[in-house]
Image (cartoon, rainbow, N blue to C red):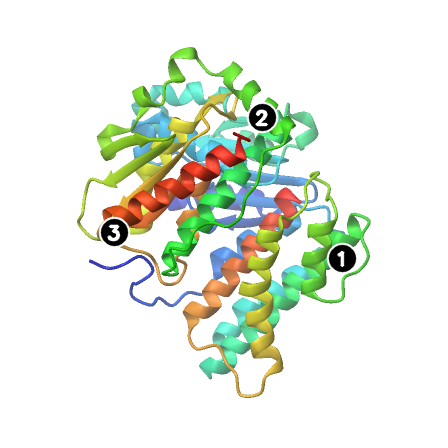
Amino acid sequence: MSPLGSGRPQVSSHRKRIDALKALIAASTIQAADKSTISAEFEEVQSCARVRNTPRRWLLQVLHSTRALDTALAVYILTHGGRDPRILGQALIYVRDNTGPNGNNLPESWRSTYQTNIVNGRNRYMHQAGHFPGNSTEIATLLKWMERCLTHVLTRW
Amino acid sequence: MHRNEILGTIARELSDDFTVAVNPDLFEGPDVLAGRSGDLVAVFVPKQAERQNLKRLRARLGLSRLALPKHTRCVLAYTEGMLERAPKLSSAHQDFHQIVSIESPANLRATLTDRPENINMKEIPAQARALVWERADFLFMLSCRYLQGSAAGEKRHIKLSAQQVDSFALSLKYSHPDLWSLEQRLPRSLGDVELKDSVVIIREKNATPRPLSNLLKPYVAANFWLNFNMDGGIPYLITWSASVLITGGTSASSLDPLKPFGAAALAGLTIIPETEASAVQSTVDIVSSWLRKAAGE
């Protein structure tokens, strides 16, 4: 019997996930110009699928998806009276320490989960020479955590 | 009319005004999700299993309402053929914000692109939502720990606020008294089920290996109804319990192993692989202890 978590690796275009994120952004209180910028950045994740060199493709997908998340969180915080957080880690701390439009704070357990699964993972690839994501599953997992983080903030914060 | 054609028709009607996602990557979520400024539309087209059992459709709606932003407008779209074969579908109008026939193009467009301010949008009370999310967070984290191969105990101790406890009491008011007995409502058809310290332990009935997401759907729906009552489309929490599903032959998608866990957690369900009796007992103790602490006992 296979344990949970095992299974045949799959290749995905991430299309459905990106479309769902764009729909959520479109319905949010973020200003129209920023929505376009964020959607375009998410769209780049999909466009990268055409890059033949796979480590480079995965690295670009990490870059575009985290830039989209960084911007989405920053402008959402700004829209709701916060200061512009320069980095993702600061944005997570801000939503933990301040109550959002839905009247909630991000619990510390979730902040540290997102810090570990998104920020730390992303930083390794962005700042350390020679480091590339190992496979497409890693990208899918990172995208999933980003979606969860963004949905969490837009829906519950 | 094929399902893909139906979803394509809906997407086309929305595409001028909305950013549209067909089959968005949400476990037990809507079939089409579309957003424009201040308006998020979730369209549900009943699947065959849901037409045979309306409770499956209502559970999907309830879970989506809990998971998506509070201003989400939920629309049921159907064909006349669906209605002929499942006449009870028409009673779903009380749970959805809007209901529309696919075969009436003008009406379909007008309904889908209606402004939210024209619709009576009854929201889930914020405290009730927060209460469900507290439990879902805990159960999701627990599933993830087992998925990652770590059975470490949950260290996060939370306590529900007085407002949350009040909200739960309010939920109980909306439920029918004969729904209160957890013992009577256990989903025994789904396998070997027992109740220990407010924790429902379910051993998967079918050990044939199959994808986790397929396996989970009936369990998620059954646990939704074990935990919630729906009134006017609002899911009201009616028990402070949680379920542990012990699965045998499953294979989670390696691409996105987390996907089904979020919806399962919202329905009050955590998933662990088949393991020794002592490990199951340890999980039950962790969940039971969390439920008691959260309720301030």
Choose the circle earlier in sequence order: 3 or 2: 2
Mark 3 residue type = Thr
| Mark sitting on residue A45 | none
Q: Distance between the residues labelled 2 and 1?
A: 42 Å
Residue most toward the bottom? Answer: A130
- Secondary structure under tag 1 reads helix
**Residue wearing tag 2:** B165
Q: How many marks?
A: 3
User: Which quarter of the picture shows residue B36?
Assistant: top right
Question: On what subunit does the disc labeled 1 rest?
Answer: A
Q: Which of B116 and B187 is in front in this view?
A: B187
Q: Distance between the residues labelled 3 and 2?
A: 34 Å
Residue A45 falls left or right of residue B267:
right
- Residue B276 at x, y percent in the picture: 23, 50
- Secondary structure under tag 2 reads helix
Q: Distance between the residues labelled 1 and 3?
A: 52 Å
Q: How crowded is mark 2: few (under 14 residues within 10 Å), some or many (20 or more)?
A: some
- Residue A79 at x, y percent in the picture: 78, 50
Looking at the image, residue B187 lies above or below residue B87: below
> Is there a contact, CB below 8 Å, between mark 1 and mark 3?
no
Q: Residues within 10 Å of mark 1 (few under 14, many from 20)?
A: few
Residue B164 in view in this figure? yes
Question: On what subunit does the disc labeled 3 rest?
Answer: B
- Residue B74 at x, y percent in the picture: 54, 33
Say yes or no: labels 1 and 3 on the same chain: no
| Mark sitting on residue A33 | 1
- Residue B219 at x, y percent in the picture: 32, 37
**Residue wearing tag 3:** B275
